[in-house]
Image (cartoon, rainbow, N blue to C red):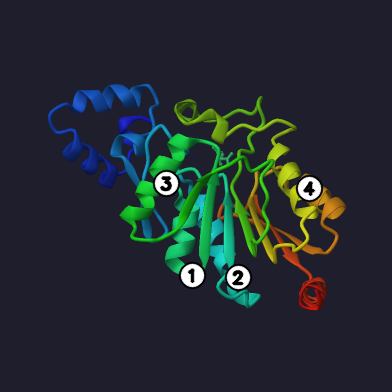
Amino acid sequence: MKREEISQIDLKLLQEKYKDNFEFVEQKLKENYPVQYLIGNVDFLNTNILVDERVLIPRFETELLVAKTIDRINDNHIQNPNILDLGCGSGCISIALKKNLLCEVIGVDISEKSLELARENAKRNEVELQFIKNDMTTMSYEGADVIISNPPYVKKEEEVGESIKYEPQEAIYASEEGLYYYQRIIQNISKLEKKPKLIAFEIGMTQGSAIKEIAQKYLTDYKIEIEKDLTERERYVFLTLNTLSFFLHSMQNMIR
Ligand code: GLN
């Protein structure tokens, strides 16, 4: 990012934080180093999240993922849900959910380093939730009412911005045309005895129809909706368990 592309607010923050060595900032910006890492935190909905090279920088699109998910949880009257955030990174999604909704949240990530920062972020935002190390492709999702994920979804050969090289690569790229994690998550859910009522994904803008196909194959009892972000690009997939299936599941559990 060039100095003239930085907002006045960010420039002011940087001048304050690096008042004795602003040359460092200028050098870093020349190298396309992310301005968010230099500042050290980002606003995310009504939270503030510390960021450094251990975690992916929260994106605007992901704020909308959280807002839309909260609306759906409320619209579907899912009360006090147990929410699983797969690939939680900095913890931004988990923390924003916990701060804005009556719910229990578990954030899962394979990176111990990101979990350290996520825990720090929870403390900073005064919310109580668990951050656990696990592999989202093999772990059990048993007991989750809602599953939310912004997994790595960028194809290996995709053109991306210069500054992305400073972010954890394992949080960005995925095999199988970027679909690997959706495939694994959806297949894992299909094997669950008690299915989550809502699944919310952030997706790459060209991946909607492919993910819909996977969901149609493995999760036949879900309604599938693709939604756009503020730039009119397909960015979210919401899977809602059909009311009848939900009812039958509950009955089965009562009889048992
Ligand atoms: N949306 C991010 C980007 O374009 C990628 C994050 C992800 O893969 N979940 O850089």
Seen in the picture, residue 112 relative to 208 is either above or below; the reply is above
Kindly report the distance in space between the C-alpha atoms of the residues bearing marks 2 and 1: 9 Å
**If you read the primary sequence from the N terminus, does the residue marked by circle 1 or circle 4 appear first?**
1
Label 2 sits on residue: 73
Please state the horizontal and vertical placement of residue 46, each as a whole percent of the image.
38, 61
Disc ID at residue 93: none
List x then y, in percent, for residue 5: 35, 36
Name which residue type carries label 4.
Gln
Residue drawn at (80%, 53%) of the image? 191
At label 2, the amino acid type is Ile
Q: Sequence-wise, which precedes: disc 2 or disc 3?
A: 2
Q: Amino acid at mark 3?
A: Ala
Which of the two discs, 4 and 3, labels the residue nearer the N terminus? 3
Say which amino acid is labelled 1. Leu
The residue most toward the front is 256
Q: CA distance from mark 4 to mark 2?
A: 23 Å
Residue in view at x 28 percent, y 43 percent: 10
Q: Residues within 10 Å of mark 4 (few under 14, many from 20)?
A: some
Label annotation for residue 118: 3
SS at mark 2?
A: helix
Mark 3: secondary structure: helix
Percent from the top left, x then y, of residue 234?
67, 51
The numbered disc on residue 187 is 4
